[in-house]
């Protein structure tokens, strides 16, 4: 690596299902201004701008071309990235590589989605062929219901365990000023009383459609220490792709096969000397569109043995004050502006390392954190962040 890369600016919008008060560019500008303010920089200090969103969900073609003023991108190099649900992490990876290469010293990375502009479910169901993509005909809901059933059958997890994950998420969301859904849930019964979308996936088991944006400022080592007193270093990023009809935990009834999640973290851990993730990593912000998926990912990311993710939930290990906090921000179940969702995972993990997460700051000291992203075709992006390198 030519340059070590740090996050020196973090900005988010407040997330809601509808942002009729702003246009898409105006919404993105909110996150950009916040990130620049956090870095104490001006738009003129940014050398390149990288953006990501799922434009088919909004029906707005090449939106980055329409917001060059709001992003400060006029006359500057950059890219727009779209890799499915991983777009907001792929753009982090692109910005990281360009700064690490030495081509730029300061770059702006933006993930965004204004889902009140279009029809996300229609876009998902129309994105596949009728034969190979038959399982996606019901949109993401059908796929994650299938995953929930598979996980229940192979692991012995019960609906009560999923409800416990949902309670944890809501607790974090209610403490996070930027989160979308803040339901104030008090009991497992409240979750179990919500109706089924597709059995066994309930209404409260699944993520919302959110509108919002997240922006990060990256800087090379010699710039980072001058810009921010608490830079968070990107230690490594790994991406692994797979075909949709081999979709990770969706398609493996035994839970023993390795899929993109396992392979990504195995590479990441090996390259960075991590032999015991629970010991060597302090917390994680993972991409979990449903509470069932979160338990499954505990296993895929090697936080516990296969088929035992629900046991971590029973023991309270992943709570904000637990041994290994997961998604103290409320996670994707609470906030899901799809193009920004993986960027938010990185942002929230960085805030935990800085100790700047406010009321949803975890109780343990965080020096190392993992952020992940999951795409519809079962693409995984895993990002390792550290306080120091």
Image (cartoon, helix red, strand yellow):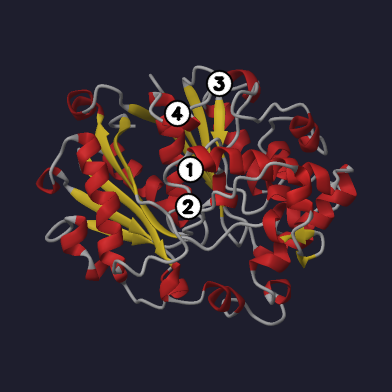
Residues packed near mark 1 inside 10 Å, few (<14), some (14 to 19) or many (20 plus): many
Q: Earlier in the sequence, mark 3 or mark 1?
A: 3
Circle 3 sits on which residue? 273
Separation of residues labelled 1 and 4 (CA atoms) = 11 Å
Local crowd size for mark 3, using a 10 Å CA cut-off: few (<14), some (14–19), many (≥20): few
Question: If you read the primary sequence from the N terminus, does the residue marked by circle 1 or circle 4 appear first?
Answer: 1
In the structure shown, which secondary structural element does the residue marked by tag 2 occupy? helix
Secondary element under disc 3, as helix, strand or loop, is loop
Q: Where is residue 242 in the image (x, y as percent from the top left)?
A: 63, 57
Does residue 72 appear to the left or right of 59 in the view shown?
Answer: left
Question: Mark 2 or 3, which is nearer the eye?
Answer: 2
Tell me how far mark 2 sits from mark 3, CA to CA: 28 Å
Residues at badges 1 and 4 in contact (C-beta under 8 Å)? no
Q: Return the residue at label 4.
A: 352
- Where's residue 39, x and y in %? 22, 35
Which residue does the numbered mark 1 point to in the structure image? 345
Residue 380 versus residue 312 in the image, above or below: below
What is the C-alpha distance between the residues marked 3 and 4? 22 Å
């Amino acid at each position: 690596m030519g340059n070590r890369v740090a996050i020196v600016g973090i900005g988010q919008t407040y997330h809601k299902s509808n942002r009729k008060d702003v246009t898409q560019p105006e919404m993105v500008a909110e996150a950009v201004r916040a990130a620049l303010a956090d870095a104490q920089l001006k738009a003129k200090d940014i050398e390149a701008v990288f953006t990501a969103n799922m434009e088919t969900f909004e029906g707005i073609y090449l939106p980055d071309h329409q917001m060059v003023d709001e992003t400060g991108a006029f006359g500057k190099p950059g890219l727009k990235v779209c890799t499915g649900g991983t777009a907001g992490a792929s753009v982090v990876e692109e910005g990281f590589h360009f700064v690490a290469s030495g081509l730029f010293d300061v770059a702006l990375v933006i993930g965004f989605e204004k889902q009140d502009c279009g029809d996300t479910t229609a876009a998902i169901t129309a994105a596949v062929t009728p034969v190979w993509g038959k399982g996606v005909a019901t949109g993401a809901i059908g796929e994650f219901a299938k995953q929930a059933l598979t996980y229940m059958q192979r692991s012995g997890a019960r609906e009560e365990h999923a409800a416990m994950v949902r309670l944890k998420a809501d607790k974090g969301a209610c403490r996070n000023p930027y989160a979308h859904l803040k339901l104030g849930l008090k009991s497992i019964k409240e979750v179990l009383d919500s109706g089924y979308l597709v059995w066994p996936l309930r209404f409260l088991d699944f993520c919302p459609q959110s509108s919002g944006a997240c922006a990060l400022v990256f800087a090379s080592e010699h710039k980072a220490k001058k810009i921010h007193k608490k830079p968070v270093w990107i230690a490594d990023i790994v991406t692994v792709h797979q075909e949709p009809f081999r979709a990770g935990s969706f398609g493996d009834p035994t839970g023993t096969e390795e899929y993109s999640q396992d392979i990504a973290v195995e590479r990441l851990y090996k390259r960075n000397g991590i032999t015991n993730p629970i010991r060597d990593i302090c917390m994680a912000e993972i991409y979990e569109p449903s509470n069932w998926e979160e338990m499954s990912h505990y296993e895929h990311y090697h936080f516990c043995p296969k088929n035992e993710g629900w046991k971590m939930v029973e023991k309270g290990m992943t709570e904000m004050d637990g041994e290994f906090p997961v998604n103290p921000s409320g996670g994707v179940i609470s906030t899901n502006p799809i193009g920004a969702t993986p960027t938010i995972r990185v942002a929230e993990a960085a805030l935990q390392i800085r100790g700047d997460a406010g009321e949803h700051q975890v109780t343990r000291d965080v020096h190392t954190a993992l952020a992940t992203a999951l795409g519809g075709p079962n693409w995984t992006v895993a990002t390792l962040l550290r306080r120091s390198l």
